[in-house]
Amino acid sequence: MRTIWWDDEKKAVGMIDQTLLPERLEDILVGSVGELCEAIQSLRVRGAPALGAAGGYGVALAAARSAATNPAALLHDVREAAGVIRAARPTAVNLSWGVDRAVKAVDEMGGSAGVEEIRAAALAAAELIAGEDVSINRALGDRGARLLEDGDVVLTHCNAGRLACVGWGTALGVIRSAVAEGKKISVYSCETRPLHQGSRLTAWELSEDNIPVTLICDSMAGMVMRQGKIDKVIVGADRITRDAVFNKIGTYTHAVLARAHGIPFYVAAPISTFDLAHSEKEVEIEERDADEIRRLGERQLAPPGVEVYNPAFDATPLDLVTAIITERGIFRPPEMADLG
Ligand SMILES: CSC[C@H]1O[C@H](OP(=O)(O)O)[C@H](O)[C@@H]1O
């Protein structure tokens, strides 16, 4: 089961609406760039690799739905849509990476291409991104599984599973691969306030796969590490610059705690999440709506007007990272420069 796909009959992007989990597993069809951006910003589709596919499919959607009857007008519509989609969530590099790959495929068609050829090129690029993702994550997972021993207890944060990808997962992909090899792995999933990807998505995914999972509050991570319950920490990533790993808010805290307790801290991410041309200080960290913290559904958890700071991601300096697990291999931070 894929997390995101193309519905050619309806010329729309299909996706699991992750805001409904764990209560309901339901698909939605997205038929416009505006609807796609809403789905991205509302985290109906989320997670770096899934956003990469959403970026590619967004370009294909723009091309398919454009009313343009000549190539120049269609290219204009595609490029305009590309800019809007890139801006939907600024921190995860895969969104713009997916958009750029589809736009590049369209540009490479050259001036003689007709509108249908341009539409086909955009969709082919998007399908390639989505199709590659599962095999990339399995390769990454299989490599990372070597780091896990039978009986390991792994702490993870947010959701870097198949719901964050087109399939299989990155951090949870490593766990799935280790389990597939016959290793008994159990997981501590941090709930990941304020949007609870850990409780709503990771705990759901692992329960569906019959992988033992224990849900904890984010604030309990230090205690379980100090109690000796955790053997490894594995998280995903949204962007890896030459000096830091950007991931869900709270990841940095776990990295510091892991270092304090002598626990290996691994990041699992495809090469497409690397952005070595930039440093930490050049990356925009998405800040989200204050009511995500002030409220929980219908419940008011704080005074309505209280000041809120709600960054969606934090940056973990590479010197706190034991190794980064990719489809090309496992890299200690100093070796990352070779990734180019
Ligand atoms: C495999 S990338 C998953 C990555 O994306 C999540 O962020 P969000 O749920 O806001 O898209 C989180 O940072 C995960 O580690």
Image (cartoon, rainbow, N blue to C red):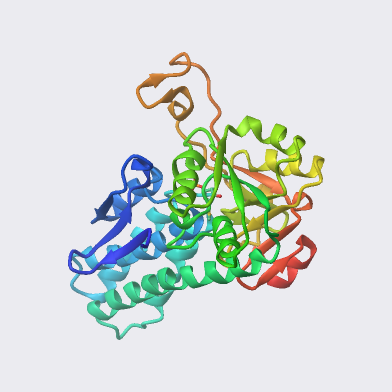
* Residue in the image at 39% along x and 49% along y: 40
Dividing the image into 4 quarters, which one contains the C terminus? bottom right
* Residue in the image at 70% along x and 47% along y: 316
Relative horizontal placement of residue 296, taking residue 177 as reference (left or right): left
Q: Taking 223 as reference, is 34 above or below it?
A: below
Q: Taking 38 as reference, is 329 above or below it?
A: below
Q: Taking 265 as reference, is 189 above or below it?
A: above
Whole-percent x, y for residue 319 in the image: 79, 52
Looking at the image, can residue 340 be seen? no
* Residue in the image at 65% along x and 64% along y: 144
Relative horizontal placement of residue 280, taking residue 88 as reference (left or right): right
Q: Quadrant of residue 151?
A: bottom right
Relative horizontal placement of residue 70, taking residue 194 as reference (left or right): left
Q: Quadrant of residue 215?
A: top right
Whole-percent x, y for residue 258 in the image: 75, 43
- Residue closest to the eye, 107 or 220: 220
* Residue in the image at 37% along x and 75% along y: 106
Dividing the image into 4 quarters, which one contains the N terminus? bottom left
Q: Quadrant of residue 275?
A: bottom right
Q: Taking 61 as reference, is 189 above or below it?
A: above
Residue furthest top in the image: 303
Whole-percent x, y for residue 113 in the image: 29, 83
Looking at the image, can residue 269 be seen? yes
Residue furthest bottom in the image: 112
- Residue closest to the eye, 109 or 321: 321
- Residue closest to the eye, 67 or 200: 200
Whole-percent x, y for residue 109 in the image: 36, 82
